[in-house]
Image (cartoon, rainbow, N blue to C red):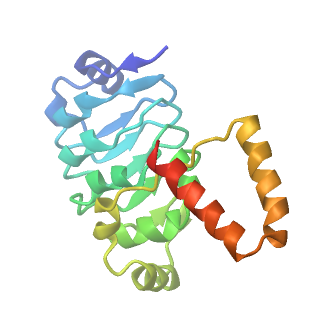
Amino acid sequence: MSQTLTSEIVLKKTKNDSLNSVKNLNLWGYSLKDISEIKNLPNLETCALSVNEIDSLEPFSHCKHLQELFLRKNKIAEFQQLKYLMELPNLKVLWLSDNPITNLDDYRLFTIALLPNLTKLDQVDITEEERQAARQKFPDPVSKLSSPEPEPAAQETPEQEAALNAIRALLPHMGPTELTALRAAVITARTKK
C-alpha cells in the first residue's frame, strides 16, 4: 500500500529536531508515492528513496543543495520529469536504474545532456566521450522536454489484425487503381475516429 512522506517520518528517521537541519535522508523501501514533503527540506544533500513508488521528481526542485539522489526501482517514466532536476547545480550523482524512464531511447545520453553537472549516472561514471556524444545528439535538450511524446499506437483487436494481415498479403498483387482506393478508404476510416 502506498505511503505519504510526512514531516514526522522524516524527523523520526533522521533524528533531527527541524526539517531545515536534515541533510541526509534514507527511506529505502517505504512504499512511498507522495513525497511532496521533500519540498520542506531545503538543505537536503543526499537522498536515498530507492524501492518506492515515486513517479514525480517535482518535489526535488526545491532542494538546491542536493548532491546525490538515489531513486532506483521507482516509477519515474518520462523525460519530462528530469526538468525538475535542472536547477540543482550541486547534483552530481543520480541513480534511476530500474525505473521505466531507463527504457526510453537515448536515456543515458539525454540525461547527461540535460544535467551537465552530473558526474555519475546509475552508478557509472560519466566520461568526457559521453558528454561530447550527448551534446552532439542533443544540442538543445530542453526543446525535447517541450515537445509532446508520441502517443502509443492503439492495440488492434484480433479482427482488425486479421484484416490488416489480409491487406498486407494482397498489396503486392494490387494495381494503381486498387492502391488509390485502399488509400482513400484508410483516410476515410481515420477521419471517422
Give the percent coordinates (x, y) of residue 64. 19, 52
Is 151 drawn above or below residue 171 in the view shown?
above
State the residue lying farthest toward the front: 177
Residue appearing at x 23%, y 20% in the figure: 7
Give the percent coordinates (x, y) of residue 11. 26, 22
Left or right placement of residue 99 versus residue 89 in this view: right
Is 90 drawn above or below residue 26 in the view shown?
below
- Residue 96 visible in the picture: no
Residue appearing at x 35%, y 53% in the figure: 80
Q: Nearer the viewer, residue 41 or 80?
A: 80
Q: Nearer the viewer, residue 104 or 9?
A: 104
Give the percent coordinates (x, y) of residue 144. 35, 66
Q: Nearer the viewer, residue 90 or 162?
A: 162
Is 136 drawn above or below residue 56 in the view shown?
below
Quadrant of residue 185 within the rendered picture? bottom right
Give the percent coordinates (x, y) of residue 95. 48, 52
Residue appearing at x 18%, y 29% in the figure: 19
Left or right placement of residue 12 versus residue 165 in this view: left
Left or right placement of residue 132 versus residue 155 in this view: left
Quadrant of residue 162 within the rendered picture? top right
- Residue 166 visible in the picture: yes
